[in-house]
Image (tube, helix red, strand yellow):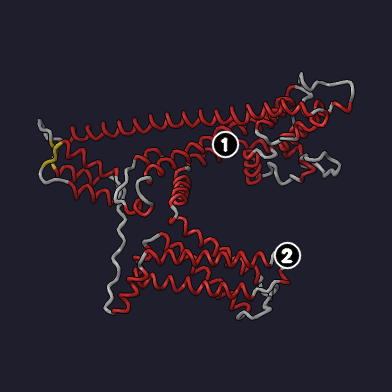
Amino acid sequence: MLLFAKGENPKHNGEWETYFRDLPTSLSSLLVLLTTANNPDVMIPAYSLNRGYSIFFILFSGFGTYFLMNLLTAIIYNQFRGYLLMSVQASILRRRLGVRAAFEVMSCQGRERVRVDASLQVMARVQMKSYYRQAIIKVRKDGFIQWEAFRSLFDELDKDRIKVHPPKPEYNSPLLQRLQLVFSHYYVMIVGNAVALANVMCICTILVLDSEKSIAERDDYYMEVINCFFILYYLMEMSLKILAFGWRGYLSYRNNIFDGLLTVCLLLLQITIFATYRLPFPKWNPASRGLMSLWEMVRLVNMLIVVRFLRIIPDIKLMALVASTLVDLVKNLRAFAGILVVIVLYVFHYSVMSNSSMENITINFTMECGSYEQLGYWPNNFDDFASSLVLLYNIMVVNNWQVFMDAYTRYTTEWSKVYFVSWWLTSSVMWVNLFVALILENFIYKWDRSVTCSVADVERTGYETTVQLMFR
């Protein structure tokens, strides 16, 4: 406010009038600049008068955005790791104490040992997964169990289940045996990935060639021929894998389940296209027939083919780590998402004031460029729960979030800025940084585990420690 004070010449007061008129406006302008949402708009009036004014904004952004905000992320991550480590240590200590207490309660009077039949009676009442129970029973001793053996029983709870694939079917025919040997080999999956890549490249080539054509001008014959060829290959691949592994063996692999479901979906869609529009021929483009146009059906088929190409992810070590990290986060972020929804439910009551103040606003085409009205942000509101979620998400992303804050400030009260800034601090600063910390911890753990072995070796590993489950 000292730097951009009101001057005598009205033409030179653009910076003061728009961004630094009073203390609340100045604070919000610099806070939005901290998130880079109004950069370079906030400095354009002053920069138009003198280029030297850019030094202030560059120093502010450089120090605040690139130093302080990243330092804040590092602080939050460090605190998160410390809390996580203490939590895991406390969990391990409680479990060891519980194991020792169980041994003392179950031990024979005056003897440091536990009867096997007594431990089996207790296990019969305990709720645990069947493979844990079987593993503990398998390693137990006969008669009595000493303390070290008793403690080692609980190590079985630190091990994941060994995924044993069903045995392959046995064929008497030499031809079937040879087919089984060939199509159960690892290289068959590589060939399938290469075919999926070729399919995606063909789709991209046709899309590029037809990008300037309207739907009515496109000849879908070549696209249909390509789809039919590759769908027949996928169907043959699925059939031969079922022949090689058997139904149970085929379904025991997640890649096969993914590919099989997509193959069935592609086949059903293609049969529907043939039933509706008959077999393809040159200049075959009945795009307006039926309840669903041919182009929409073909587009849906091609989207599924592109999705099928994602099966290469497990074969790439780094991509497999990324994918497994994302899957683990989806599985274990229920509490995180629950907190978000609960807070949004409380925030939802804010819509009462905003609706009553903004429901009768008419579009004014003379509004300032970049304003809520000029940008047509009308769907972003608090009219209902779904639109509230979308609006709060847009603010969390911080792109143009000052537009929403300005609109609600103009039509409600200046205190609405407190609400938007509080939501930005809670969601974008705190939750997003915690989310980054979760991703880093999960990814670093998986990366360290995979440094000494490949992804396939990790999948073949019989047991994994469940310390990661404690982290979750």
Q: Residue at x 31, y 33 (%)?
A: 92
Res. 466 image quadrant: top left
Q: Residue at x 57, y 73 (%)?
A: 226
- Residue 173 point in image, percent of width and height: 29, 80
Distance between the alpha carbons at the discs numbered 2 and 1: 47 Å
Q: Is residue 136 above or below residue 85?
A: below
- Give the residue type that dot 2 points to: Glu
Disc 1 is placed on an element classified as: helix
Query: Which quadrant of the figure contains the C terminus?
Result: top left
Residue 273 percent location from the top left of the image = 60, 75
Which of the two residues, 310 or 468, is positioned nearer the viewer here?
A: 310
Q: Is residue 353 visible?
A: no
**Element under disc 2:** loop
Q: Nearer the viewer, residue 125 or 135?
A: 135
Give neighbour class at mark 1: few <14, some 14-19, many 20+ (Cα, 10 Å).
few
Specify which label sits upstream in the sequence, 2 or 1: 2
272 to 166, vertically: above or below: below
Q: Between 159 and 122, which is closer to the camera in this rendering?
A: 159
Mark drawn on residue 212: 2
On-image quarter of the N terminus: top right
Above or below, 465 against 250 in this view is above
Q: Is residue 16 left or right of residue 139?
A: right
The residue identified by callout 1 is 343
Mark 2 Cα shell of 10 Å, populated few (<14), some (14-19), many (≥20) = few
Q: Position of residue 3 (x, y in %)?
A: 77, 20
Q: Amino acid at mark 1?
A: Ile
Q: Residue 5, position in %: x, y? A: 81, 20
Q: How many marks?
A: 2
Instruction: Confirm whether residue 238 shows in the render.
Output: yes
